[in-house]
Image (cartoon, rainbow, N blue to C red):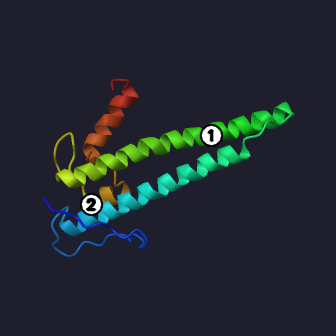
Amino acid sequence: MATFEPVAQDAPVLPYQPAPGEAYMSAAQLAHFRKLLLDWKQSLLHEADRMVNHMQDDSSTFPDPNDRATQEEEFSLELRTRDRERKLLRKIDESLAQIDSGDYGYCESCGVEIGLPRMLARPTATLCIDCKIVEEMREKQGGA
């Protein structure tokens, strides 16, 4: 298993261009995905801090019931967004652990390569496209 150096947080993550004949999930690809995931995580954590500060700063008691209802609805939307971000942070942490264990980029259901295009589109993907389609069909049928 390869060890990775800390990635500078100020450099932007550019789209990955594999070298001709480059092996799937090479050290360069894993380093790219690690940086991408770490930057994404940092961005989500920053946004969460911003949201908490916003809710604390804007929290006030309005005498008008309509104003209070509007504020409550805004806070409710922000909290739902925060909950989705919390779940995404967990997926990012799981993906980082998969990079460390050498399982990143391989389907957790059937073990085949997920594929670089799918991983670039969804870096937290854990299923190949075929297994994901089957999972979604089961969910639609209520069998999941």
The quadrant in which residue 22 appears is bottom left
User: Can the viewer see residue 130 in this picture?
Assistant: yes
Q: Where is residue 9 in the image (x, y as percent from the top left)?
A: 40, 68
Residue extending farthest bottom: 20
Location of residue 122 with respect to 67 vertically, above or below: below
Q: Where is residue 113 in the image (x, y as percent from the top left)?
A: 19, 53
Residue at 48%, 52% in the rendered image: 45
Q: Where is residue 110 in the image (x, y as percent from the top left)?
A: 17, 41
Q: Name the amino acid, label 2.
A: Leu
Q: Position of residue 78 (x, y in %)?
A: 61, 42
Q: Name the amino acid, label 1.
A: Leu
The quadrant in which residue 29 appears is bottom left
Mark 1 lies on residue: 77
User: Can the viewer see residue 114 in this picture?
Assistant: no
Q: How crowded is mark 2: few (under 14 residues within 10 Å), some or many (20 or more)?
A: some
Count of marks placed on residues: 2
Location of residue 32 with respect to 85 vertically, above or below: below
Residue at 17%, 49% in the rendered image: 112
- Which quadrant of the rendered structure holds the N terminus? bottom left
Mark 2 lies on residue: 116
Residue at 19%, 75% in the rendered image: 20
